[in-house]
């Protein structure tokens, strides 16, 4: 069984290649194709395997078959190893722009009491990125994409800068805690 080997192949459209290298782990590191390559283990029918996804094969394998379902030629790199491979390298090419990002501002939780049959509105805020809402009873939400409910003891993260309405249609007072996170 191979400890570790990285191989590069080029396949024409709809071509397949047998790779006679025994191992227990396989991963496509790169591919120039527009769609996934197909991989068959020890004579099994090839199936799609995306680049970057590794497979640990219990009991190992003796050979694999890689098929190119793309309309054009594909060059790919594959790793075959005795066991799982962890590769933490990072390669960056070209111009990399960096910018300092200001930390988000979190407004401490604001408590609101919503009486039976009333609505509590939270105004729109241009810089708001998210808000965390938590309630100790059932509330109906509107003013966000779609509508929803907060249930007793539940919490929800909303991604909106728009106004949000919380309506209490229960027979009990509901306490709402609202924490805003803005840029």
Image (tube, helix red, strand yellow):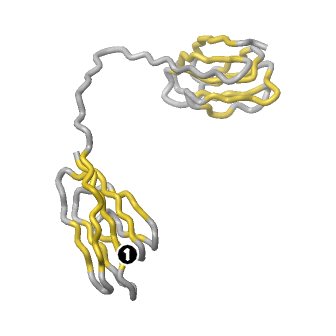
For image coordinates 61% across by 18% down, the residue present is 78
Camera-side residue of 180 and 86? 180
**In x, y percent, where is residue 148?**
39, 69
**Circle 1 sits on which residue?**
139
Could you say which is closer to the camera, residue 106 or residue 170?
106
Query: Which quadrant of the rendered structure holds the N terminus?
Result: top right
Q: Quadrant of residue 15?
A: top right
Q: Is residue 33 above or below residue 170?
A: above
Left/right of residue 101 with respect to residue 54 in the rendered view: left
Looking at the image, which residue is at 42% across and 76% down?
137
Q: Is mark 1 on a helix, strand or loop?
A: strand
Quarter of the image for the C terminus: give it.
Answer: top left
Instruction: Please give left or right for residue 15 compared with residue 172 in the image.
Output: right
Q: Mark 1, residues whose alpha carbon is within 10 Å: few (<14), some, or many (≥20)? A: many
Front in this rendered view, residue 163 or 180: 180
Q: Is residue 165 above or below residue 27?
A: below
Quadrant housing residue 102: top left
Rendered location of residue 154, percent (x, y): 45, 66
Please tell me whether residue 100 is drawn above or below residue 105 in the rendered image.
above
**In this orientation, does residue 27 appear?**
yes
Who is closer to the viewer here, 85 or 134? 134
For image coordinates 26% across by 22% down, the residue present is 97
Q: Which residue is pictured at 62% across the width and 24% down the height? A: 27
Quick check: can you spot residue 149? no
**Location of residue 33 in the rendering, given as x and y in whole percent from the top left corner:** 51, 24
> Hey, which residue is sitting farthest bottom in the picture?
171
- Residue 91's quadrant in the figure? top left
- Numbered label tally: 1
- What percent of the width, then of the height, locates residue 40? 72, 28
């Amino acid at each position: 069984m191979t400890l570790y080997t990285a191989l590069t192949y080029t396949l024409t459209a709809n071509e397949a290649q047998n790779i006679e290298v025994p191992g227990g782990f396989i991963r496509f590191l790169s591919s120039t194709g527009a769609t996934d390559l197909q991989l068959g283990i020890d004579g099994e029918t090839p199936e799609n395997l995306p680049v970057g996804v590794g497979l640990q094969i219990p009991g190992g394998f003796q050979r694999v078959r890689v098929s190119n379902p793309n309309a054009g030629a594909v060059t790919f790199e594959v790793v075959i190893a005795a066991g799982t491979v962890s590769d933490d390298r990072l390669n960056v090419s070209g111009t990399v722009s960096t910018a300092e990002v200001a930390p988000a501002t979190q407004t401490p939780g604001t408590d609101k009491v919503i009486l039976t049959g009333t609505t509590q509105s939270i105004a729109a805020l241009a810089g708001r990125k998210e808000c965390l809402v938590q309630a100790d009873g059932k509330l109906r939400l509107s003013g966000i994409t779609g509508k929803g409910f907060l249930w007793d003891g539940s919490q929800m993260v909303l991604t909106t800068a728009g106004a949000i309405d919380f309506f209490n249609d229960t027979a009990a007072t509901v306490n709402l805690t609202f924490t805003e996170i803005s840029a």
